[in-house]
Image: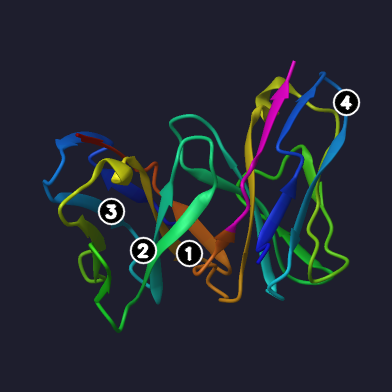
Amino acid sequence: KQEVTQIPAALSVPEGENLVLNCSFTDSAIYNLQWFRQDPGKGLTSLLLIQSSQREQTSGRLNASLDKSSGRSTLYIAASQPGDSATYLCAVPYGNNRLAFGKGNQVVVIP
Amino acid sequence: NAGVTQTPKFRILKIGQSMTLQCTQDMNHNYMYWYRQDPGMGLKLIYYSVGAGITDKGEVPNGYNVSRSTTEDFPLRLELAAPSQTSVYFCASSYLQDGTEAFFGQGTRLTVV
């Protein structure tokens, strides 16, 4: 079974600071890893999908890295904005057709 | 561009009642999933389907049933609702076998009283 841990569970940063969100997983036999954003009372929105062959994926101010050997992925958000306030979830495949989710990194960006 | 559509958005059930949560997707994805999300917890997989007519249990299937008669639809049935089923339910679909590149519905907030 895949165990996914996200650290820190919650953080508050002033606007403009860079954010570093960590995800660790126990079973490194994966091809892909996905990061999602969830706003309060809403569904999950996909941010980035990293393939194991890529090791890194970028979209605008977001950059996600993947190190399978150490069972870690990191999501970087540059120059944070109040609109980045949300919960960020890491999803890692396991078994057949299954995703394991971490409990999330709850982010508050203070104007 | 509907994506994954869930209905209803909110529902209150009495203990022992039954209901069906509807989920439909218009992306022709083979893989569909039902998750529940409880406060402070990650998403837990209830059931999933790899195609029409094929379903399988996830981590927390007790008290639920599913069917997949078409590629588009994947309803979740709650029989004899219990307070422990109070949760937010999410339906998702994907075209990748490992479940990544998943698209989620907006969720159904269910309260059992």
* Element class at badge 3: strand
Which dot, 2 or 4, sits closer to the camera? 4
Query: In the image, is residue A25 above or below residue A84?
Result: below
Q: Which mark is residue A94?
A: 1
Q: Residues within 10 Å of mark 4 (few under 14, many from 20)?
A: few
Query: In the image, is residue B98 above or below residue B19?
Result: below
**Disc 2 chain ID:** A
Q: Which mark is residue B17?
A: 4
* Residue A60: quadrant of the picture: bottom left
Q: Which residue occupies 73% across, 40% down?
A: B62
Q: CA distance from mark 2 to mark 4?
A: 40 Å
Q: CA distance from mark 4 to mark 1?
A: 34 Å
Of B53 and A82, the residue lying toward us: A82
Q: Which residue occupies 44% across, 51% down?
A: A101
Query: What is the magenta range?
Result: B104-113
Task: Specify the farthest residue to the left.
Answer: A17
